[in-house]
Image: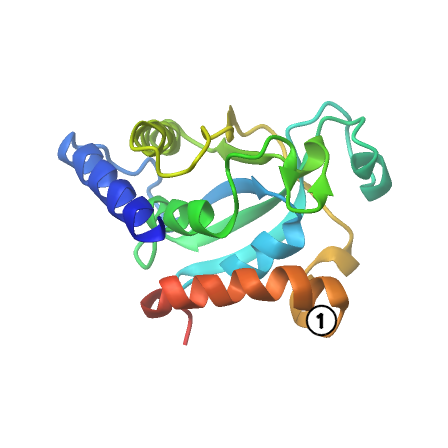
Amino acid sequence: MIKKLIIIIAATLTNLHAQNIKTMTKEHTEMITLGGGCYWCIEAVFQKLEGVTKVESGFSGGTVKNPAYREVCNGTTGHAEVVQITFDNTKTSIEEILKVFFTVHDPTTLNRQGADVGTQYRSAIFYHNQQQFQIAKSVIDKLNKAKVYDHPIVTELSAYTVFYKADDYHQNYYNDNKNAPYCRMVIQPKIEKFEKVFKDKVKK
């Protein structure tokens, strides 16, 4: 399944580049915001991807300004737990980031990743420009058409508006708490999967 997923994404992106879609930033630095369940998991994975310069955990997609973690956990603010990824687009790309994203989480479970249940754990892509939207939509359409997963993808695709950074103790969580049960049982397997599938893309 993983091999098929990567092949489909690569083919989709080749077609998009053939249409002469160009990056919309004049600088080498670009950002994208992703939700794939608990942000500790996604943060830990993307911190290891070559070309990523910063990963911050926080909240996006809701209606409450400056939400507290407990509010988001109650599921009443509309926010998703997300990571805001800053990357050097000469060393990695939206293409590579989406390959990783669709490999390390399940985009077919609505408002759930494993035992983490609630709208705050939904799968989501908050795109920062039209190029990101076109790439993400095309990838989702192709993966659904090819039936890479047993069920349809339910990943939310929304325009980025605002990111609220979580408290400091939520940042770099896996690296600071590797022996915690959640880190060993939930996060570590995702990291191992990433390192196996994308071994040539792991930071040295």
Above or below — where is 85 with respect to 20?
Answer: below
* Numbered marks: total: 1
Look at the image and tell me whether residue 169 can be seen: yes
Q: Residue 180 occupies which quadrant of the picture?
A: bottom right
The location of residue 104, given as percent across then percent down, is 49, 52
Look at the image and tell me whether residue 172 can be seen: no
Type of residue at label 1? Answer: Asp
The location of residue 39, given as percent across then percent down, is 65, 49
- Lateral position of residue 79 relative to residue 195, left or right: right
Foreground residue among 203 and 156: 156
Q: Disc 1 designates what residue? A: 176
Assess disc 1: are there few (<14), some (14-19) or many (≥20) residues with their C-alpha within 10 Å of its C-alpha.
few
The outermost residue toward the left is 18
Q: Quadrant of the C terminus?
A: bottom left
The outermost residue toward the front is 150
Helix, strand or loop status at disc 1: helix
Which colouring convention does the figure follow? rainbow
- Lateral position of residue 14 relative to residue 6, left or right: left
Residue drawn 52% across the image and 25% down it: 158
The location of residue 121, given as percent across then percent down, is 66, 38
Residue drawn 34% across the image and 33% down it: 147
Q: Residue 150 occupies which quadrant of the picture?
A: top left
The location of residue 49, given as percent across then percent down, is 44, 62
